[in-house]
């Protein structure tokens, strides 16, 4: 008997290779890049806050679906750098874009709901590598009550750059994410998956320990403190039943130390327990956490200190 089998596509005996590749999430500070990464992963991996420049380092998050593996790279917001730390953050974003298969460019609605693409966005877009498809994600549309106005904004943005697609979303409300995944998936090459199906990130636990302490400080303090803060893991001892973690929070000035410690040490206690909860949920077990606050003036301008603090290497 003659058996006729479909050759391509969809022969169940020869499944096609999955779509897989790296996806850089790029944009100005505070547009919601890290919130978007977390929403796409269904996991609170990257830290977020209302402060610009919350993200200092590239954070990689892996999402594996039945037919695709997305390696998302969250980047620090591209901005006018005034310090050595700032310049390094911009470089991180550029490197991630350079190595990406697809770029997700995030922007948000202006307070006046301007239709045209912002100048600052155009500048960043002009610096992206040629030949990499760029998908525009217009975030924070939950702030827009007049949905008809959205059409104007979408049309205006489409005029400003040759985007492959424009997707309005609310990362906060987890609205529109499927559309992003579809637009990205369609543009990823087929090949071998780079990570196990259950992989979430390439960063070691101590990187996230540091980040989650920094997140608590960012969320609980105002303007002047956050940018002067560096968190360093001094000890990460997993040998016992209860992992022991000790960290130093370096601040630029004595006044900042006072703010972070708070009256009677109250704020520092809150920072510690907030971070500990987040760390424990990531590691899936209880930990012992101790935080020291130290005054180290000008740490963000010193190349040596930046390296010692993990802002030079890759391992956090
Ligand atoms: P990033 O600097 O681009 O990584 O921005 P973050 O993810 O840290 O978010 C910056 C701020 O915007 C935070 O206060 C977020 O809660 C807020 N945000 C992010 N996405 C949305 C959204 O879809 N809607 C609204 N209303 N706020 C958002
Ligand atoms: Mg961020």
Image (cartoon, rainbow, N blue to C red):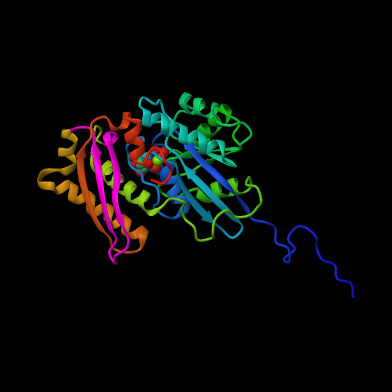
Which x, y percent locates residue 165?
59, 39
Q: Nearer the viewer, residue 223 or 286?
A: 286
Q: Position of residue 115 (x, y in %)?
A: 49, 29
Which of the pair 132/195 is nearer the observer? 195
Q: 286 or 316, which is in the foreground?
A: 316
The answer to whether residue 196 shows anywhere in this view is: yes
Q: Is residue 142 visible?
A: no
Quadrant that contains the C terminus: top left
Q: Residue furthest right?
A: 1
Who's the residue at 46% across and 26% down the image?
120
Position of 180 relative to 28 (above/below): below
* Chief SS of the magenta region: strand
Report the magenta residues as a range.
Answer: 226-253
Q: Position of residue 164 (x, y in %)?
A: 61, 37
The picture quadrant where one finds residue 42 is bottom left
In the rendered view, tell whether residue 260 sits above or below residue 18: above
Q: Is residue 100 magenta?
A: no
Q: Residue at x 90, y 76 (%)?
A: 1
Q: Is residue 2 above or below residue 207?
A: below
Residue sitting farthest toward the bottom: 1
Ligand 2 location (quadrant): top left
On the image, the x and y values in percent for residue 309 come to: 33, 40
Q: Is residue 283 left or right of residue 124?
A: left
Residue at x 54% of width, y 59% of height? 196
Is 241 covered by the magenta stretch?
yes
Residue 69 is left or right of residue 40, and the answer is: right
């Amino acid at each position: 008997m003659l058996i006729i089998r479909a050759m391509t596509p969809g022969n169940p005996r020869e499944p096609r290779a999955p779509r897989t590749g790296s996806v850089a999430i790029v944009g100005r500070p505070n547009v919601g890049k890290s919130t978007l990464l977390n929403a796409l992963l269904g996991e609170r991996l990257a830290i977020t806050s209302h402060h610009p420049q919350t993200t200092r380092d590239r954070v990689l998050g892996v999402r594996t679906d039945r037919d695709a593996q997305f390696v998302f790279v969250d980047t620090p917001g591209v901005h006018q750098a005034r310090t050595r730390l700032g310049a390094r953050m911009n470089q991180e974003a550029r490197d991630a874009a350079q190595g990406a298969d697809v770029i997700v460019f995030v922007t948000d609605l202006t307070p006046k709901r301007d239709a045209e693409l912002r100048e600052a966005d155009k500048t960043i877009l002009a610096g992206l590598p040629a030949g990499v498809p760029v998908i525009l994600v217009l975030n924070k549309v939950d702030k827009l009550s007049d949905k008809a106005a959205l059409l104007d904004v979408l049309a205006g943005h489409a005029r400003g750059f040759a985007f492959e697609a424009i997707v309005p979303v609310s990362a906060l409300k987890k609205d529109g994410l499927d559309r992003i995944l579809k637009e990205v998936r369609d543009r990823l090459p087929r090949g071998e998956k780079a990570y196990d199906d259950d992989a979430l990130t390439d960063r070691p636990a101590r990187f996230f320990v540091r980040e989650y302490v920094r997140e608590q400080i960012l969320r609980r303090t105002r303007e002047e403190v956050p940018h002067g803060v560096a968190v360093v893991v001094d000890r990460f001892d997993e040998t016992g039943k209860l992992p022991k973690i000790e960290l130093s929070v370096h601040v630029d000035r004595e006044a900042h130390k006072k703010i972070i410690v708070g009256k009677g040490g109250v704020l520092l206690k809150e920072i510690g327990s907030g971070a500990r909860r987040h760390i424990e949920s990531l590691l899936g077990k209880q930990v012992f956490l101790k935080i020291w606050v130290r005054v180290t003036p000008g740490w963000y301008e010193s190349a040596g200190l930046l390296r010692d603090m993990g802002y030079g290497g890759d391992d956090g």
